[in-house]
Image (cartoon, rainbow, N blue to C red):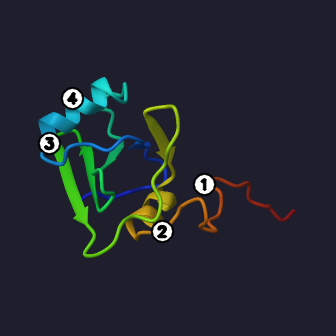
Amino acid sequence: MIQITPHMRILVAVDPIDFRAGIDGLVALCRQRLDADPFSGGLFVFSNRRRSAIKILMYDGGGYWMCQKRLSSGRLAFWPDGASPARTLEACELQVLLMGGDPAQANVPPPWRRLQVAA
């Protein structure tokens, strides 16, 4: 099972991929398109052209994990865009994305905030 923690680096590929790609194909995409090290322990998130499915790739030190979610109906409400090939997300934003929501519209606390210490 993949555990998503707040300190993980999460990269979302902006451009869609061919979903026939397996682990080796996604590893190559990480290196070529995203210019990222697939052995880094980060999560790499990909979508198909219709935005109806997501694949996640992660290396845990002993091997690769790949999981896929296909929506039963409809399309993802949000997918990042931009000039760069990848965009980073926080763990809570990825969870919103996986539930079919828009992370930009989600009201989530910042990933780190200073605690007020009573004197």
Tell me which amino acid carries mark 3. Answer: Ala
x then y, percent, for residue 31: 29, 26
Quadrant placement of the N terminus: bottom left
x then y, percent, for residue 71: 28, 70
Q: Which mark is residue 21?
A: 3
- In the picture, measured across the screen, residue 75 lies left or right of residue 90, that is left
Name the N-terminal-most of marks 2 and 3: 3
Name the N-terminal-most of marks 4 and 1: 4
Residue under pointer 4: 28
Q: Residues within 10 Å of mark 4 (few under 14, many from 20)?
A: some
> Which mark's residue is nearer the viewer, 4 or 1?
4
Name the N-terminal-most of marks 4 and 3: 3
Residue under pointer 1: 111
Which quadrant of the structure image shows residue 72? bottom left
Q: Which mark is residue 101?
A: 2
> Which mark's residue is nearer the viewer, 1 or 2?
2
Name the N-terminal-most of marks 1 and 2: 2
Q: Which mark is residue 100?
A: none
Query: Residue 117 or 63: which is nearer the viewer?
Result: 63
- Asked if marks 4 and 3 touch (Cβ < 8 Å), the reply is no
The kind of secondary structure element at disc 4 is helix
Name the N-terminal-most of marks 2 and 4: 4
The kind of secondary structure element at disc 1 is loop
Q: Height in image: 39 above or below 77? A: above
Query: Residue 84 or 43: which is nearer the viewer?
Result: 84
Q: Which residue shows up at 41% across the image and 69% down it?
A: 100
Q: Residues within 10 Å of mark 1 (few under 14, many from 20)?
A: few
Query: Residue 83 or 22: which is nearer the viewer?
Result: 83
- In the picture, measured across the screen, residue 12 lies left or right of residue 2, that is right
From mark 3 to mark 1, how far is it between C-alphas? Answer: 32 Å
From mark 1 to mark 2, how far is it between C-alphas? Answer: 19 Å
